[in-house]
Image (cartoon, rainbow, N blue to C red):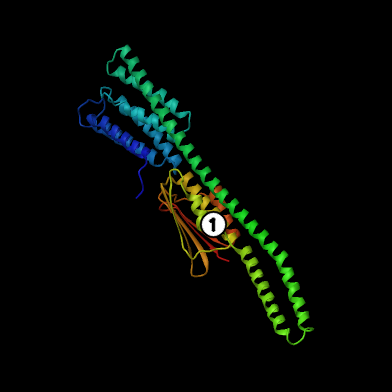
Amino acid sequence: MRRIEPDVWAGLAMLLVCAGVGTPTLLGVTDTWVPRVVWSALFIALMITTVAAAVWEDHRRDAARVCYGTSVVLGWLAVLSAPTAGWLPILLVITATMGAYVAPGWVSPVVIALNTAVIAVTAHLAGTTWTGIGLTALLYLLIQAAALLSSMAIIREQRLRRELAEAHVELRAATVILADSARAHERLRIARELHDLMGHQLTALTLELEVARHHDGPGARPHVERADQVARNLLRDVRTTVGQLRADAPDLRASLSAVVRDIPGLDVHLWIDDDVRPPEEVSLALIRAVQEIVTNTIRHAGATSLRISIENTPDRAVKLTSVDDGRGSPELRLGNGLRGLLERIDAIGGDVRLDGGDGFRVTATVPAR
């Protein structure tokens, strides 16, 4: 089950505050300047549009802004039509705060100014003295400004955390790939030296023994033949070792574990089948694919958990599957990260399927050649 983040709890608390300040008027404890049914409809519509703006904040930005603008106007109407409702202007504080999440940066100060004017008019309609009107307007102005600044600080902190997590993943992946490349170059260097230093000499020894076999006496012939066989076996072993040094791939499990370890704000569960041992090119492609998947999850999904599995398929391919518990995206829009993932897998003859219906799922199949 997905873990509920602190900002979600904060949103639920604010929703309860809205319900709390509006309930007395709904129940008839305070008077309204419009029929109570009309005011109740305004208040319910305000709650619905506010929740819709919060829910659609990320993946339906235009709809969220329409809902936000509607909630601002409904808040003004609700407060103006119940001027004696006490703490009802808190609704305007909440709509001003929502602007930090939904609207462009210039909108919130404008909304705060208009909200303050509405609060001043409401206080005047309630029969408050000019001093009281000024103090009330100033109080709510300061509350709105403080709430807005706090929300902006939270948003900035969340953005910095995401950027830190992305940089963390990119640095780990780059370190792993650099280390694997260094090991691959070292293996290749050793393979070349083995081939150059021993392979040629063993070949020459074999030729010399071949010549000696035709010139030595009968008693020496068995020894020469055994020496010849030893030389041939040694040459074969050297060639086998060189071939293995050239073909050995990086340790996929260790490499991926290093990439996904200790990512701030995201729990990554990695499972790799023990039989998965792809060649170096495929291993590097899988490492890069996992990096792109994790970065995309941090940047867009709003997820707290990501599951990644890698296994062999019956047709001798390697299958990578990842799924997160984020918000998903029914309408897929490929950014640079996902487009790079598709190109990377396609370059080695693989296939990628994306599904944003329930969370976000990536299924990549690459040939284990």
Kindly state the secondary structure of the residue where label 1 is placed.
Answer: helix
Vertically, is 248 above or below 111? below
Label 1 Cα crowd, 10 Å radius (few <14 / some 14-19 / many 20+) = many
Residue 55 point in image, percent of width and height: 38, 41
| Foreground of the two, 132 or 181 | 181
| Residue at horizontal 27 percent and vertical 31 percent from the top | 39
At x 40%, y 24%, the residue is 145
Give the camera-side residue of 256 and 70. 256
For residue 83, side relative to residue 367 (left or right): left
- Residue lying at the far bottom of the rendered structure: 218
Q: Residue furthest right?
A: 215
Q: Residue 84 at what x, y percent from top left?
A: 25, 22
211 relative to 72 in the view: left or right? right
Examine the image and state in which quarter residue 181 appears: bottom right
In this rendered view, identify the residue nearer to me: 2 or 145: 2
- The vertical placement of 175 against 212, above or below, is above
Q: Residue at x 28, y 35 (%)?
A: 16
Give the residue type at disc 1: Leu
Residue located at (51% from left, 55% from top): 254
- Seen in the picture, residue 211 relative to 150 is either above or below; the reply is below
Residue 293 in sight here: no
Return the x and y of residue 163 as percentages of the image width and height.
51, 40
> Which part of the image, by quadrant, shows the C terminus?
bottom right
Of 23 and 14, nearer the camera is 14
Residue 107: tell me if it is visible: yes
Please give the residue where the numbered disc 1 appears in the rendered image: 286
Picture coordinates of residue 231 (x, y %)?
A: 69, 75
Looking at the rendered structure, the number of numbered marks drawn on it comes to 1
